[in-house]
Image (cartoon, rainbow, N blue to C red):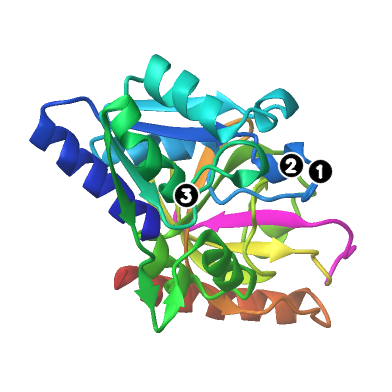
Amino acid sequence: MGHQTLLLRTVEKAKELDLPSVVVTYYPNPSVVLGKKPNFKYLSSEREKEELIRGFGIDYLVVLDFTLELSKMSAEDFLEKIMIKTLNSKHIVIGYNHFFGAERRGDFNLLNSNKTTYGYAVELKEAVLKKESKISSSLIRGFLEKGEMEEAKILLGRNYHITGLVFEGAKRGRTIGFPTANIKVPEDKLLPAIGVYACFAKFGGKDHKGMVNIGHNPTFDGLGLHVEVNVFDFDGDLYGKEIELEIVHKIRDEKKFSGLDELKNQLTKDKEESIHILNFD
């Protein structure tokens, strides 16, 4: 929601000034390159980010390759070389918690003190609050890591998405009437808390209702972390295809069952609850 206000304001101001709207971002995340968070997990892939930004009506997305060399560029050089000489910025909208340049010295104050020199205007977007908490990616991560999908949705403005390729699994689900597609999710994608979720599965240009288990399959080998989706009322080959999961609600925690009959009974209940939830989403 915080980024949404920035994007909306940027589009609004660009139309007012009859100028193209541009968003500048980085990849990889600076904390990865600088070694502060080598196992950093992303909320959105670069493709998802591009689609989301395009959806707000932004004209251009500039993704800077964040390198050690770029991290050493002074804030003044970043402003002059990238924001002025490369992008010819005339009006800059910056978030309260955004910094640029070496040692994170670039901020609203630095931009404001240089606006006359370079002939641009600048405005600061303050934090958007939710129950007295500043909306941030950290707050969203916290909700996802607890499986609180509805709270995350409010801040994201949409359900959380996971995308990956289907690969061949052990095929145990089909023996009890609940075939699953095993999804290979990029290692740097943040997964919600371990558990069973109601979801929509999108492939072939269509949305299908389903439920997804994110966990270790404790009833079987209990090894590794798996993302397995049971797509309701579908009986086809998905191997090698890309599936996008829209995760709606956590139904329950993962648990170990005494046998296949107990597991099947629970999955039947999970499916009924998922259908009820998805019919009202």
Any magenta on residue 225? yes
What secondary structure characterizes most of the magenta part? loop
Q: Secondary structure at mark 2?
A: helix
Q: Is residue 49 left or right of residue 9?
A: right
* Foreground residue among 71 and 224: 71
Amino acid type for the residue under numbered disc 1:
Gly
- Viewer-nearest of discs 2 and 3: 2
Q: Nearer the viewer, residue 180 or 217?
A: 217
The residue indicated by pointer 3 is 234
Indicate the quadrant where residue 20 lies. Answer: top left
Q: Say which amino acid is labelled 3.
A: Phe
The magenta segment: 219-236
Q: Are marks 2 and 1 in contact (CB under 8 Å)?
A: yes
Q: Is residue 75 visible?
A: yes
Mark seen at residue 35? 1
Which residue is found at the position 66% from the left and 55% from the top? Answer: 228
Residue 140 lies left or right of residue 131; in this view the side is right
Q: Is residue 226 above or below residue 241?
A: below
Q: Can you identify the residue that label 2 sits on?
A: 32
Quadrant of image for the C terminus? bottom left
Residue 205 shows in the view: no
Nearest the eye: 117 or 45: 117
Cα–Cα gap, marks 2 and 1? 5 Å
